[in-house]
Amino acid sequence: MKLKKLEMALQKLDGFPGPRAALEQYQTPAPLAARLLYDALMQGDIAGKAVCDLGCGTGVLAIGASLLGASLVKAVEIDSGAAAVAKKNAALAGADIDFIIADVRDPDVPVRVGQCDTVVMNPPFGAQKAHADRPFIDCALAVAPVVYGIFNAGSIPFVTAYTEGRAQIAGMTGGSFPIRRTFAFHTKDVQDTGVEILRLKRTPQNQR
Ligand code: SAH
């Protein structure tokens, strides 16, 4: 599937029914999601691989991974309402996804997910709750040796320090995340936020 076709397929998916600010529920815009997935595909991290989406929301990344030929896709989400939308989206897109309703902070989650080849995620940036992205990074590195995550622009020093001895940043693509007016504290119709798609590679001695 070509990048443009993937983007169009993701564009059709339904959004959050009632976005929850505390969970930082922002659907990844189709062009950014397609970019992440296509970069991962080109690196050999999607086709024929077991892929896990952490905090799948409405399923954009999980569904895209499935459309690009992942052999197995698991998707973890804390909010059952969002997961219900993701399930509907997956059925309409013809994507076969194993949904797990769980909190990534629960140490049991990596056990329930099992070992995967690749994690894709757009975790909360920690704007509502400081460090909300940390348990996502921890869970991701427990689940897979390769992780693609969307982070705020300028996150490289934090991610490097936080994953020291556990992983290395093996790639970075800059992008922009247009956030539409969703919550009362938003002051603009659309706010462009600079983001970085980081590819983390788990260091061999940290493989569990
Ligand atoms: N990955 C989706 C959604 C991104 S928004 C996309 O790219 O469109 C972040 C998602 O993480 C939300 O769906 C939110 O409900 C979920 N989330 C937040 N905290 C979580 C936690 N502790 N465990 C699991 N999911 C969580």
Image: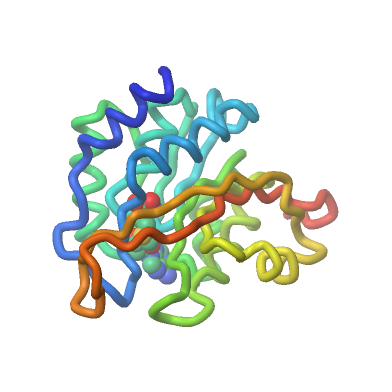
Q: Quadrant of residue 178?
A: bottom left
Q: Quadrant of residue 160?
A: bottom right
Question: x, y percentage for residue 117?
Answer: 61, 39
Visual colour scheme: rainbow
If the picture is divided into quarters, which one holds ligand 1?
bottom left
Q: Residue at x 60, y 26 (%)?
A: 42
Of residues 76 and 93, the one drawn nearer to the viewer in this rendering? 93
Q: Quadrant of residue 19?
A: bottom left
Question: x, y percentage for residue 184?
Answer: 19, 78
Q: Residue at x 53, y 77 (%)?
A: 131
Q: Residue at x 38, y 38 (%)?
A: 31
Q: Is residue 36 left or right of residue 60?
A: right
Q: Residue at x 55, y 61 (%)?
A: 153
Question: x, y percentage for residue 188?
Answer: 24, 68
Of residues 6 and 184, the one drawn nearer to the viewer in this rendering? 184
Extreme-right residue of the structure: 205
Q: Is residue 38 left or right of residue 184?
A: right
The correct choice, above or below, for 41 with respect to 151 in the image is above
Image quarter where the C terminus lies is: bottom right
Question: x, y percentage for residue 46?
Answer: 54, 30
Extreme-top residue of the structure: 1
Image quarter where the N terminus lies is: top left
Q: Is residue 205 left or right of residue 96?
A: right
The correct choice, above or below, for 185 with respect to 20 in the image is below
Of residues 117 and 41, the one drawn nearer to the viewer in this rendering? 41
